[in-house]
Image (cartoon, grey):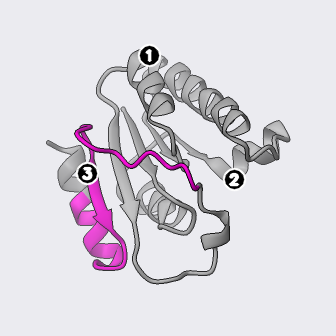
Amino acid sequence: MIVVLFGQPCSGKTTLSKYLYDNVYSFDFQIDGDNLREVFKNKDFSKEGRLKNLQKASDIAAYLDNQNYDIIVSVVYPYKEAREYLNSIVPNVKWIYLTYNEPRGRENFHVEDFDKPIGENFLRINTSQVTIEQSIELIKTYINE
């Protein structure tokens, strides 16, 4: 099983991913975008640089899934083509799109050309409107569908 939390920086991806990993599910691996950038030394935030990192994240997740591991991924995934790539190599990815309303201090890191998911199969959570606990309950219900 692969569960992906995606959205703009500071939307709650890492917070919710860590909570799910540590407290709720017995995920075998947690893949975080910030950690991947450190490992692969890719500081290129252009579309091409982002797509390169996203393909690596997708390939790692697909490999682990193929080994029957459960993975939670917290990566921005701003481009529809990157999400489609993961969907093409792994069936039944659980996508969770996180958004927020109020400024959180990292808006200058937002991806300006973010392809908001429309018509894709995903759960949308506005983390400005629900608590961490409520978000976790929404995610648990979605994963178990």
From mark 2 to mark 1, how far is it between C-alphas?
A: 23 Å
Is 32 above or below relative to 99? above
Q: Amino acid at mark 1?
A: Ile
Please, which residue is most extreme toward the left here?
145
In what element is the residue under mark 3? strand
Local crowd size for mark 3, using a 10 Å CA cut-off: few (<14), some (14–19), many (≥20): some
Say which quarter of the image contains residue 37: top right
Please, which residue is most extreme toward the right here?
41
Position of the C terminus, as image quadrant, is top left
Q: Residue at x 34, y 50 (%)?
A: 96
Is residue 133 inside the magenta stretch? Answer: yes
Question: Mark 2 = which residue?
Answer: 34
In what element is the residue under mark 2? helix
Where does the magenta region start and end? 112-138
**First in sequence: mark 2 or mark 3?**
2
From mark 2 to mark 3, how far is it between C-alphas?
A: 23 Å
Q: Position of residue 105 (x, y in %)?
A: 62, 80
Question: Mark 3 = which residue?
Answer: 123
Q: Residue at x 41, y 58 (%)?
A: 20
Q: Position of residue 47 (x, y in %)?
A: 66, 39
Q: How many marks?
A: 3
Q: Position of residue 33 (x, y in %)?
A: 64, 48
Q: Position of residue 117 (x, y in %)?
A: 34, 45
Marks 3 & 1, CB-CB < 8 Å contact: no
Q: Amino acid at mark 2?
A: Asp
Q: Amino acid at mark 3?
A: Leu
Local crowd size for mark 2, using a 10 Å CA cut-off: few (<14), some (14–19), many (≥20): few
Question: Mark 1 = which residue?
Answer: 89
From mark 3 to mark 1, how far is it between C-alphas?
A: 20 Å
